[in-house]
Image (cartoon, rainbow, N blue to C red):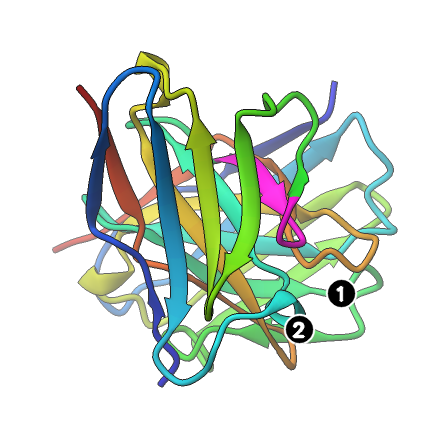
Amino acid sequence: QVQLVESGGGVVQPGGSLRLSCAASGFTFSPYNMHWVRQGPGKGLEWVAVIWYDGSDKYYADSVKGRFTISRDNSINTLYLQMHSLTPEDTAVYYCAKDSGGGYCAFDVWGQGTLVTVSS
Amino acid sequence: QTVVTQEPSLSVSPGGTVTFTCGLNSDSVSTTYYPSWYQQTPGQAPRTLIYKTNIRSSGVPDRFSGSILGNKAALTITGAQADDESAYYCLLFMGSGIWVFGGGTKLTVL
């Protein structure tokens, strides 16, 4: 079945780095833009970043621009989020999400999320 | 700064109708923002309900509907059920590769 599985979350000290991965299966990964979305404890959803289907374009929320880098490897159906200079405000569950395609600008498949905790 | 506005909370009686709205602090919401809607229960990943204003995602019952009402996007539940008690988020595409979620609405069914 169509599935996204995130990994790589954990506890990291302020100022530290972490790389998240999202393994896709059950659908053809390469034609679709992919997103990262996060949710802080007790907070709402926050869109973080998008990468175009071929990796040619990447866009970021202002809150992470310059610190986070989104990337993908279509040969192994995997999406990544490299995070640097982490602060406690980055503590959240991080979800990867598949763009619906078709010009609909929506997300139609979600992973279960991976928890990132930034704390000393 | 772009702010997408939603009601913090709403309530509905079982069998009743409830409408959530999604606005912008700087503009009217139209179909050009490709509004979509997501449902989330505590501890779970979001579930896609509506995309491109009014297209139901696969498997979503037809008691969920999307529209534009005035200057806002709207999600309406007709015939609310107990298991509709969740948080609901709207998402707008701002163009230039940027998406923004609303703050979410917590629905109570009582």
User: Quick check: A28 left or right of B46?
Assistant: right
User: Quick check: A63 left or right of B71?
Assistant: left
User: Quick check: A76 left or right of B83?
Assistant: right
Specify start and end residues of the magenta stretch as a single range: B47-54
Quarter of the image for residue A29 reads top right
Which amino acid, mark 1? Trp
Q: What is the chief secondary structure element of the magenta stretch?
A: strand
User: What crowding class fits label 1: few (fewer than 14 Cα within 10 Å), some (14-19), or many (20 or more)?
Assistant: some
Which amino acid, mark 2? Lys
| Image height of B28 relative to A103, above or below | below
| SS at mark 1 in the image | loop
The residue where tag 2 is placed is: A58
| SS at mark 2 in the image | strand
Quarter of the image for residue B12 reads top left
Check the residue under mark 2 and report the chain it is in. Answer: A
Decide: marks 2, 1 in contact (CB < 8 A)?
yes
| Image height of B87 relative to B29, above or below | above
* Label of residue A52 in the image: 1
